Image (cartoon, rainbow, N blue to C red):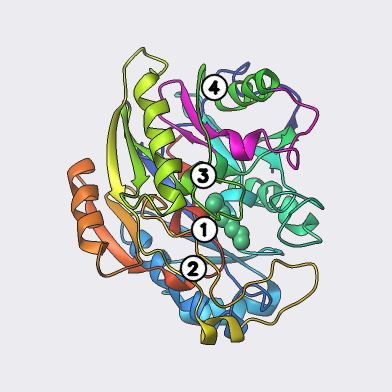
Amino acid sequence: MSATLDSTPAADGYRMPAEFEPHDGCWMAWPERPDNWRLGAEPAQLAYAAVAEAIAETEPVTIAASDAQFERARALLPPAIRVVEVTIDDAWIRDTGPTFVVDGGGGRRGVDWRFNAWGGHEGGLYSPWDRDDRVAHKVLEIEGADRYRAPFVLEGGAIHVDGEGTVLSTEECLLNHNRNPKLSREQVEAGLHAHLGTEKFVWLGRGVYEDETDGHVDNLACFARPGVVLLTWSEDESDPQAAISRDARERLEAATDARGRPFEVVLLPSPGPLQIGVEEAAGIDAVAGTKARRAGDRLAASYANFYVANSRVVFSLLDERHDEEAAEILRGCFPEREVVGVPGREILLGGGNIHCITQQVPHA
Ligand code: KQY
């Protein structure tokens, strides 16, 4: 049973741990909507299953699947992976699931952010989204964790924390008029600190070029450990990504974290540029009101969109010209973990990647 609390995590002594801290498990959801995923989502389901299997080697995985997909998910996933029925609009549990917070004394609760499909009726990706807005509450009920219902819109992919008081995000997303138009920058910072148990905000500018989430930080940059940030990088000055990444690097190099440390910035190569292929676009059932995916559209591909599991880093294989270089950089940043690449293009075609489809349950 999950009680809804009317205080905030920070007031109650809770904080969001960094992803590289120990986990008790990981949640994912099961893709199915044919207006986002090609060929009735079958290739995406195989890609999600491969991610789930790679994570399940190191921590328990639970998959939320609709009633219509329950039997198929069960059949495609190994028995060690738990499948539960949860009604969903789409399968991005980083954004629809809860952000778990812990108190360091065995307590674990969850923050249930308001969800508006990345922009509501001003650029959101589908409508309706009310079933996705209820996913976090249902996950908390299954986990038996009490719930904070945040009074503002936020997606989990829009933030990263270092677990030591610092939160990293982007202006493009958090200050976008389609999220919380009535909140000032200072009010956004205060709301995040109250719900994450953080005290220092580090603002980046824009996210990855053409990212349909309005620039989620989880596709651009992330903490490898406190004081060390991995950043998507492009040396190609004709690519708009180069200026975006340069601005992010300058901001990081000018900032300090909650403990007063300067950041070391580690650069990750950008895949591609990658575009949607003709055959890939033809496999999507276009529907009015859902984001159109057309042949030739630039994909927001990034190696930063990986998941840090207990003893593995699971990252997306996106471009064989750069996959091994990305893996080597990740091995250098996470020397105590095995770095495992999983084919990520089918996930990318839906608009995100491995970090976006996973949600860690930190150890209480
Ligand atoms: O960046 C993320 N956390 C999610 C990407 C969602 C894309 C929706 N099509």
Tell me which amino acid carries mark 3.
Gly
Q: Which label belongs to residue 357?
A: 1
Q: CA distance from mark 4 to mark 3?
A: 24 Å
At label 1, counting other C-alpha atoms closer than 10 Å, the crowd grade (few under 14, some 14-19, many 20 or more) is: many
x 40%, y 63%: residue: 273
Label pair 2/1, CB-CB below 8 angstroms: yes
At label 2, counting other C-alpha atoms closer than 10 Å, the crowd grade (few under 14, some 14-19, many 20 or more) is: many
Left or right, residue 20 beside residue 160: left
Q: Earlier in the sequence, mark 4 or mark 3?
A: 4
Q: Nearer the viewer, mark 2 or mark 3?
A: 3
Q: Quadrant of residue 286?
A: bottom right
Q: Nearer the viewer, mark 2 or mark 4?
A: 2
> Which residue is tagged 3?
207
Question: Residue 114 in magenta?
Answer: no
Q: CA distance from mark 2 to mark 4?
A: 31 Å
Tell whether circle 1 marks a residue whose Cβ is less than 8 angstroms from ligand 1: yes
